[in-house]
């Protein structure tokens, strides 16, 4: 039975459900949970079909929330709820309510859903695509015991996993994780039978496949061995190899369906590892409503702790691209580009990524060195970091903060990067004051001598390198001239300048010193202090931030250019990773290949 309700209320929907049940001769018993699906008009059919199939195993009340805020101011100001109630037929013993929330009501979906939840029954929330950044803090997410996302449906699945790690709360899970259940079961059984020591592992799968990443993270966490993540043509995960003292254990699935398990001393055997439907994945998730601690450990283990490699099909092409992209004079990482829909989401996603990298650095080395940047995008990132619930994953007392450049102005001047950073974030953190290293001010012990101030900062960097990790120095060379920054943040200027290294300026051509005084800069104030390109290239990771139409030409030019003296951003490379983080407007002039 189907009942259409226009311009209705939650109370009328509940009454319609009762009428439909009575008409069908079946009381509302036997339903074990409420499944809430938040989707859009174009995708709701597939999601509802998968949920309906899963409800045959788990009789449920399914609430499908479709937000339609409208485009014009008049549409947005009009609040209306339309509903379609379905009982019997394809819904089986369950119930389905399709909710279309128009206008301002689209922003208050929780107020519509709350009266429709089954009393005293668990609530599961599923976002087939476009979940909120922090599912547990979303008004709808707060109603649920279980929150399901799907990193595979995002534009950048690997970045999405970083976000899941930073925002994780008990009850969160992801269908990318559910997809590896069969792989984990077979591998665990093989290891239980063999009882041998694993020395390393390799996970082979498609690029941008989050399930491959999660399986590698699970193995790295559980086995405590290096795990290499290599690329293949797919589909999905294609192979896992575990090196043991007795030989390799190999689970190889080349066709997406039937796999071959090879174990030393045993005959090869076939294993069914078909790629499961969304309905099967949802059904599995509905079987357990307790927090998945194994998923939590895997997703938070740290993507950067995996070893990255290539397989034969892509090795030659990608190696050639990497070699062509290397900055001259050292082994620098080729540029990777990540594009976000807008500057706000770019700031939030980058904050989550930064939290993950800092936490991983502290796990690996006990402390972290981060070089901050100022400007519009640098300050937006710090403000997003201040609001990020995952920031507590970092022990801020073990973070050393540095700056890539500074305006040579009196201490506390509102135009100084250090002042702006304090207001945006630093004053709210439990930092060790001895580990906060602002560049000298013009009213400091060196007075207005910018060269002396630059030399003093270079000496402070050198002291931290010599007494810290011991692997600093420009380009990773000897002498410990700078600490090995775990992340060095840079804003991109419209003229392709980074830090205070401007095109054609002597500072951009510096090859010996790590810090220089900058005079007659083309933008105010004209006197500045800046790290040089050799110091920047000593960082493990360099992230360049750009948002807005005014940065589109600079981003495209810097990613294509090769002369750092004329295009300083082209010379800003990290030893292990170079990441360009852009919004759609800043990426507008990039080719599809440049976007990665």
Image: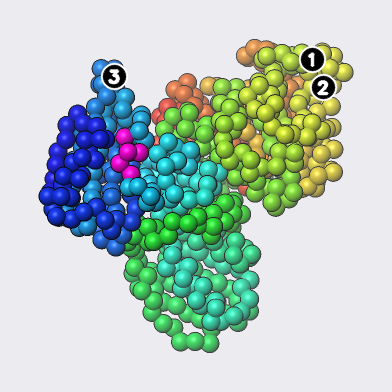
Q: Pointer 1: what residue?
A: 442
Within 10 Å of the Cα at label 1, are there few (<14), some (14-19), or many (20+) other Cα atoms? some
Give me the residue at 26% from left, 61% from top: 56
Residues in magenta, as a range: 112-117
Earlier sequence position, callout 3 versus callout 1:
3
Q: From what the image shows, is residue 575 above or below residue 380?
A: below
Where is 129 relative to 408, above or below? below
Identify the secondary structure beneath mark 2: helix
Q: Mark 2 packing: few (<14 Cα in 10 Å), some, or many (20+)?
A: many
Residue 114 sits inside the magenta stretch = yes
In the displayed structure image, the side of residue 124 where residue 527 appears, left or right = right
Q: Is residue 408 visible?
A: yes
The image shows residue 19 at horizontal and vertical percentages of: 16, 44
Q: Residue at x 29, y 19 (%)?
A: 77
Pointer 2 residue? 453
Q: What SS does tag 1 mark? A: loop
Q: How is the image coloured?
A: rainbow
Compared to 377, does 315 lie above or below?
below
In the foreground, 277 or 10: 10
Q: Nearer the viewer, mark 3 or mark 2?
A: 3
For disc 3, the marked residue is 77
- Asked if residue 443 lies in the magenta stretch, the reply is no
Dominant SS in magenta: helix
Marks 3 and 1, how far apart at CA: 53 Å
Residue at image point 48% right, 28% down: 344
Gap between marks 3 and 2, in whole Å? 57 Å
Disc 2/disc 1 C-alpha distance (Å): 8 Å
CB of mark 2 within 8 Å of CB of mark 1? yes
Q: Nearer the viewer, mark 2 or mark 1?
A: 1
Horizontally, residue 434 falls left or right of residue 187, namely right
């Amino acid at each position: 039975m189907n009942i259409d309700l226009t311009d209705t209320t939650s109370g009328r929907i509940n009454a319609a459900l009762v009428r439909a049940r009575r008409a069908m001769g079946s009381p509302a018993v036997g339903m074990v949970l409420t499944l809430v699906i938040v989707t859009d008009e174009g995708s709701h059919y597939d999601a509802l079909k998968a949920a309906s199939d899963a409800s045959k195993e788990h009789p449920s009340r399914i609430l499908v929330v479709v937000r339609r805020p409208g485009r014009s101011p008049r549409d947005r100001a009009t609040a209306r709820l339309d509903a379609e109630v379905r009982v019997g037929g394809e819904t089986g013993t369950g119930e389905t309510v399709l909710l279309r929330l128009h206008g301002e009501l689209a922003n208050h979906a929780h107020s519509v859903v709350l009266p429709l939840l089954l009393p005293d029954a668990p609530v599961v929330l599923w976002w087939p695509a476009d979940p909120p950044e922090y599912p547990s803090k979303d008004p709808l997410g707060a109603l649920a015991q279980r929150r399901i996302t799907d990193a595979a449906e995002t534009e950048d699945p690997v970045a999405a996993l970083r976000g899941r790690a930073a925002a994780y709360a008990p009850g969160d899970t992801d269908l990318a994780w559910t997809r590896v259940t069969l792989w984990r079961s077979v591998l665990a059984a093989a290891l239980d039978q063999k009882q041998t020591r694993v020395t390393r592992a390799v996970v082979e799968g498609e690029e941008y496949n989050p399930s491959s990443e999660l399986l590698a993270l699970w193995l790295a966490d559980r086995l405590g061995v290096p795990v290499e993540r290599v690329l293949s043509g797919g589909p999905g995960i294609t192979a896992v190899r575990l090196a043991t003292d007795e030989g390799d254990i190999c689970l190889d699935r080349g066709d997406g369906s039937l796999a071959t398990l090879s174990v030393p001393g045993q005959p090869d055997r076939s294993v069914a590892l078909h790629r499961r439907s969304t309905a099967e994945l949802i059904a599995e998730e509905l079987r357990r409503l307790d927090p998945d601690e194994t998923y939590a450990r895997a997703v938070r283990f740290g993507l950067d702790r995996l070893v990255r490699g290539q397989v034969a099909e892509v090795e030659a092409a990608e190696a050639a691209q990497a070699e062509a992209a290397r900055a001259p004079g050292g082994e620098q990482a080729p540029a990777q580009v990540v594009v976000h829909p807008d500057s706000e989401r770019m700031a939030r996603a980058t904050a989550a990524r930064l939290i993950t990298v800092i936490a991983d650095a502290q796990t690996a080395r006990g402390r972290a060195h981060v070089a901050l940047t100022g400007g519009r995008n640098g300050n937006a990132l710090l403000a997003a970091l201040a609001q990020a619930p995952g920031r507590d994953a970092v022990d801020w007392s073990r973070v050393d903060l540095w700056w890539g450049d500074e305006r040579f102005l009196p201490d506390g001047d509102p135009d100084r990067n250090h002042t702006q950073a304090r207001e945006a974030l630093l004053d709210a953190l439990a930092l060790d004051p001895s580990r906060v290293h602002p560049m000298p001010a013009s009213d400091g012990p060196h007075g207005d001598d910018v060269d002396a101030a630059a030399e003093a900062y270079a000496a402070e960097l050198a002291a931290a390198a010599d007494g810290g990790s011991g692997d600093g120095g420009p380009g990773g060379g000897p002498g410990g001239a700078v600490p090995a920054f775990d992340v060095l943040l840079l804003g991109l200027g419209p003229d392709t300048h980074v830090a205070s290294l401007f095109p054609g300026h002597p500072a951009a051509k510096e090859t010996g010193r790590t810090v220089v005084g900058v005079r007659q800069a083309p933008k105010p104030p004209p006197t500045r202090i800046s790290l040089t390109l050799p110091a920047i290239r000593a960082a493990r990771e360099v992230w360049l931030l750009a948002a807005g139409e005014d940065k589109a030409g600079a981003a495209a030019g810097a990613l294509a250019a090769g002369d750092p003296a004329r295009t300083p951003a082209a010379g800003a490379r990290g030893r292990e990773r170079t990441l360009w983080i852009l919004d759609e407007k800043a990426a507008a002039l990039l080719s599809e290949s440049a976007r990665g």
